[in-house]
């Protein structure tokens, strides 16, 4: 068993190797209690943080300017404050995968997450739910989990959604269920069990269905850029977010670096939450042609976001989101977005 003071690094080193794990841990501002957790068992908070670190690395791998931004920050002596990650689901039966947000909340809740706000995204026919960690709400990244309501769209659209998502597999094996229940009831797992569970949790943040047909993709794209994105990317991290002191200054600096930024900074109704983002990376994805062969097409992938959170009158950091901000940020994954 590894030194109980190094559970976070030990988990990451076991799965990523010491070099990758060290580089990641050196690039992220992590609460000391999470870096140096002690005891015979890995807490739900440490396991949640390890999962988030791996997901942040995945976004950097898929978004080149996010990787460049993180490298710049490390070279300047600053660590990222990982504020939140976002992903998309659909409220329809999805093959072997639990429907909609349940595919994700079934393990977020045992990891210590709870709903921290519900946000109607009416322009997109979606609902967003924020999940914050109960033990370290400001230090462990939140999740912004959105769910698309397919019944708001046409019958051909709904049929295409069913065909695309109907091939979904479940990335969580049956043996994970008792471990998640133990996390839920006891809040911790033995190191070996935590290590066994972690890669299966990370695997949930991916496309679980088969490549869509080009015809279905075009049907979805005509009515919802968000559903078209889900068709190619599934429940991969749509974006990860760095919490910065001054998002306006950050945006200006990234534009000077010639990185593809959103034109404007979004400001919440309260004035306390400001957000902007890189535009989505373009990725190559497979589709099934009418003849049944696989063809490749370039589509929008994931992106990287920046957020400034100010303090509420009570002195607490404002961890809320804003529906208007979110809907504007979502446009980063629409083809030709600006």
Image (cartoon, grey):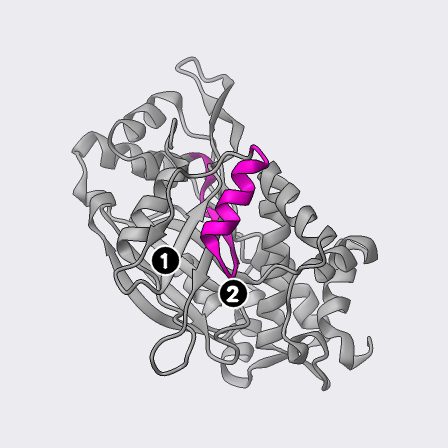
Q: Is residue 9 magenta?
A: no
Name the mark on residue 265: none
Q: Residue at x 23, y 37 (%)?
A: 158
Q: Does the magenta stretch include residue 253?
A: yes
Quadrant in the picture for residue 336: top left
Check the image and report above or below for 276 versus 272.
above
Q: What stretch is highlighted in magenta?
A: 232-258
Q: How far apart are marks 2 and 1 (CA)?
A: 18 Å
Q: Residue at x 17, y 43 (%)?
A: 152
Q: What element carries label 1?
A: loop
Q: Which quarter shows the N terminus? A: bottom right
Quadrant in the picture for residue 62: top right
Horizontal side, residue 77 vs residue 179: left or right: right
Query: Do tag 2 and tag 1 residues touch (Cβ < 8 Å)?
Result: no
For label 2, the crowd category at 10 Å Cα-Cα, with few meaning under 14, some 14 to 19 and many 20 or more, is many
Q: Position of residue 14 (x, y in %)?
A: 78, 61
Name the residue carrying label 2.
Answer: 141
For label 1, the crowd category at 10 Å Cα-Cα, with few meaning under 14, some 14 to 19 and many 20 or more, is many
First of labels 2, 1 by sequence position: 1
Check the image and report above or below for 338 versus 197.
above
Q: Position of residue 45 (x, y in %)?
A: 58, 75
Q: Residue at x 43, y 74 (%)?
A: 317
Tag count: 2
- For residue 237, say whether it is visible: no
Tell which of 144 and 71 is nearer to you: 71
Q: Position of residue 331 (x, y in %)?
A: 35, 39
Q: Where is residue 192 in the image (x, y as percent from the top left)?
A: 73, 72
Tell which of 338 and 199 is nearer to you: 338
Name the mark on residue 101: 1
């Amino acid at each position: 068993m590894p030194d109980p003071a190094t559970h976070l690094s030990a988990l990451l080193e076991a799965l990523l190797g010491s070099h990758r794990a060290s580089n990641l841990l050196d690039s992220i501002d992590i609460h000391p209690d999470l870096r140096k957790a002690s005891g015979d068992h890995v807490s739900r908070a440490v396991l949640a943080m390890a999962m988030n670190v791996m997901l942040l690395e995945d976004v950097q791998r898929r978004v080149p300017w996010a990787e460049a931004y993180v490298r710049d920050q490390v070279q300047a002596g600053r660590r990222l404050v990982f504020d939140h990650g976002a992903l998309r689901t659909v409220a329809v039966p999805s093959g072997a995968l639990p429907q909609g947000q349940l595919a994700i909340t079934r393990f977020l809740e045992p990891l210590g997450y709870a709903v921290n706000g519900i946000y109607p995204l009416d322009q997109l026919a979606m609902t967003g739910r924020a999940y914050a960690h109960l033990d370290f709400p400001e230090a462990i990244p939140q999740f912004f989990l959105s769910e698309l309501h397919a019944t708001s769209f046409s019958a051909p659209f709904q049929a295409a959604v069913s065909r695309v998502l109907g091939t979904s597999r479940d990335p969580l094996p049956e043996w994970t269920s008792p471990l998640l229940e133990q996390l839920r009831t006891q809040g911790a797992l033995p190191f070996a069990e935590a290590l066994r569970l972690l890669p299966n949790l990370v695997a949930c943040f991916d496309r679980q269905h088969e490549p869509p047909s080009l015809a279905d993709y075009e049907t979805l794209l005509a009515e919802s850029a968000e559903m078209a994105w889900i068709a190619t990317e599934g429940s991969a991290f749509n974006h990860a977010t760095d919490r910065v002191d001054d998002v306006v200054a950050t945006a200006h600096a990234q534009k000077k670096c010639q990185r593809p930024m959103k034109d404007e900074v979004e400001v919440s109704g309260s004035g306390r939450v400001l957000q902007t983002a890189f535009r989505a990376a373009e990725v190559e994805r497979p589709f099934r042609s009418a003849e049944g062969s696989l063809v490749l097409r370039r589509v929008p992938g994931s992106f990287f976001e920046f957020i400034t959170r100010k303090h509420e009158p009570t002195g607490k950091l404002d961890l809320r989101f804003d529906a208007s901000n979110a809907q504007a940020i979502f446009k980063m994954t629409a083809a030709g977005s600006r």
